[in-house]
Structures are given as C-alpha cells and as structure tokens.
Amino acid sequence: MIKKLKSTQNLSDAELLELLESEVYDEELRKAADELRRSIYGTEVYIRGLVELSNYCKNNCYYCGIRRGNTNVNRYRLSKAEILECCKSGHELGFRTFVLQGGEDSYYSSELLCEIISEIRAGYPDCAITLSLGEWPKQDYQSFFEAGANRYLLRHETANTEHYGKLHPANMSLENRKQCLFNLKEIGYQVGSGFMVGSPYQSTANLIEDLRFLQELKPAMIGIGPYLTHKDTPFNEFKSGSLKITLKLISILRLMFPYALIPATTALGTAAPNGREQGLLAGANVVMPNLSPVKVRKDYTLYDNKICTGEEAAECRYCLERRVASAGYKIVVARGDVIKQ
Ligand code: 5AD
Ligand code: FES
C-alpha cells in the first residue's frame, strides 16, 4: 500500500480504511513521506508568525474554547497599532509570513481589515500576508486580496455534512464553508484547508471523506491537528484525538499532496511535548510560532493546556529553532510559498 501511495499519490477507500484503522504507524510510511518531503523541500522548514488579533467570535462551534457561548473567556481585541507592532518585532526575528488569525469578530469591518492589510503590505513588501478570519462574502475576500493579502487559511473541519452538523450549530453549513474555499481559490489566494483528527462523532470513513475533499480542492496548505478537549465547551466530556493517527495522516497527506505546505501545528505540540518535532519527521514542513503580545496569549485558548502562552515572541522563535534542528531540519528566513499545487 505504501508503495502504491508513493507511486500513484492515491489509494482506494478500502486501502485507506485499512491503513488508518491499523494499530501501527509504520516506520516505512513515515520514511516514505519524509523522503518525498526532502526530495522537494529539502530540510527547509518555513516559519509563520501567528498574530491572534481577537478572541471575540460570533460563532458557537461546539468544540472551540472561544465560542460565543463561553462566558469564562476574557475577551480582547488588538488595535491596528498593536498588530503592526507584532509584525515589526516578527520581521526582526526573521518572519517573512504574518498570519492574522481571529474569531469572527464584526468589530473588524472589511474596511478596517483592508486598512490593516494595506499598512502591513506597505511596511513589509517582502512578506506574505496570510488571513485566517473565517467566512466572509466573496466581495470582502476580493477586497482583502486587493489590499495585499496572499493566502487564506480556512479549515473545512469535516467534509461530511452530517458530521459537520454535529460539530456546529444549525446556522453554519459545510456547503457555505466549501463555497468560501472555492471563492478564495478563484480570487487567487494560496488556500489552506484542513480538519481536526479525532473530533467527537468522527469515524474513519469521515477522515477518508476529508482526504477526498482535499483531492477535489487541491489546497496549497493543509493544516491538521488532534481535536483537544476544552473544559468550557459542550464537548468537555469527549476525549482528545490520537497523536498517532494525526501523525499517520500527516504522512498520508505528504504522499498524496507532495508539494503541500503542511504545518506541525500547535495542537500537535500540545498533545505531546515533542509533538511538533514528530510532525516534521512525519512529513510536515511548516511551523507557526506565536507572535501575539504575551498579555493576550493565555486568552486565545481554543483547547486546554495550549502551549506557547507564556513566552516572549523571541523565546518562541528560538525555542522552535532548537526543536526543528533537533529533529534534523532547518528553519529558513523566506516567504515559503508553495512551489506548485
Ligand atoms: N481542538 C483542536 N483544534 C481546535 N480548533 C478549534 N477548536 C479546537 C479544539 N478544541 C481548530 C479548528 C480551527 C482552528 C483555528 O483550530 O480546526 O479551524
Ligand atoms: Fe513557543 Fe517553544 S515554540 S515556547
């Protein structure tokens, strides 16, 4: 199966089911993914400076710690000046991609976001600007793009309609989520999607549907991480997703999408102390250290025990430098665009 996956970049549903349900994460699978990654991207690891601009959110996704219904969150918003300050220190630390991520917060109007994006674009012409700000009308995605944004992250979360309905309230739909992703592609963004591994009610068949959806979308970036419990959500009784299955999926993703930019996510690093290093060894080639002001970090908690909430931006940067090196790879100062899709 590994040989077939390597040579055809695909497997049948039955084969994927067998691979995903087997108890082992075969070293051969990991090696095949790592070899392919090295043949395309070498040992380079791209870094993205993550600026968590707001933890207000109008949505109420059942898995997420900053959902509207959680009254235990200390809500914050960063001003334009604070966001630009993050970019300034980030640029000095060698970041050439800034990711503006936040809840769906109507305080940031399309106009205000365009202003922020334009100022970053003018101040850092050598950098990529990535947005991770949820669902918007196509017209607004277009305006952000024209203001200077290059990439957009929007996980589909699950590609099965029924499962989507179990993770989200009725006012959200998979159909709309998919439409947003195709709109973003059409506009010209490098698009990132992805899903949580081990989210409540997820079956192996659902994971296969996630892979099939990604084959249809052909994203430039694919972010996955284990679902992690948050104590103040309706899902607080569900256990966290498996690290091993997440790593296995990273290897499968690398073999299916040789050129994809795949992050070793913060959720992976939260699931195990060396989770991100293991993610890199499984085929990931991106890490996304936190660039947010230290005073707000502990308030952006999508799940319990999130790492990197106490450190300074510089500490996180150098911590990751060591971690990446310990796994045998090397952080590079570059925009890190996708080579081809
Ligand atoms: N566990 C793991 N990942 C989560 N996300 C949100 N809540 C959780 C959680 N409890 C992920 C979602 C979202 C991304 C920003 O974080 O996939 O798209
Ligand atoms: Fe943030 Fe290590 S990467 S503390």
Image: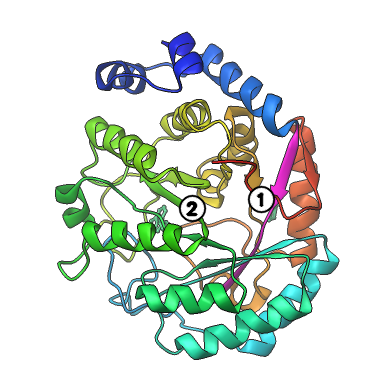
Residue 311 placement, left or right of 253: right
Q: Is residue 207 positioned above or below 25 on the image?
A: below
Tell me if the residue at label 1 has its CB under 8 Å from ligand 1: no
Residue 124 placement, left or right of 271: right
Residue 66 placement, left or right of 235: right
Q: Amino acid at mark 1?
A: Asp
Magenta segment, principal secondary structure? Answer: strand
At numbered mark 1, what does the secondary structure look like: helix, strand or loop?
A: loop
Magenta stretch: give its range: 43-54
**Can residue 148 be seen in this snapshot?**
yes
Quarter of the rendering occupied by the N terminus: top left
Residue 214 in the image: state x and y as whole percent: 38, 41
Residues packed near mark 2 inside 10 Å, few (<14), some (14 to 19) or many (20 plus) = many
In the image shown, does 237 or 69 lie closer to the viewer?
A: 69
Q: Amino acid at mark 2?
A: Gly
Magenta residue check for 65: no
Q: Which mark is residue 217?
A: none
**Would you name the residue on which mark 1 appears?**
337
Q: Is residue 23 positioned above or below 329 on the image?
A: above
The mark that comes first in sequence, 1 or 2, is 2
Q: Residue at x 49, y 31 (%)?
A: 247
At numbered mark 2, what does the secondary structure look like: helix, strand or loop?
A: strand
Q: Residue at x 40, y 50 (%)?
A: 228
Q: Is residue 101 positioned above or below 265 on the image?
A: below
Which quadrant contains ligand 2? bottom right
How many numbered circles does the render carry? 2
Tell me if the residue at label 2 has its CB under 8 Å from ligand 1: no
Residue at the far right: name it.
92
Quarter of the rendering occupied by the C terminus: top right
Residue 186 in the image: state x and y as whole percent: 42, 60
Q: Which mark is residue 192?
A: 2
Residue 219 placement, left or right of 311: left
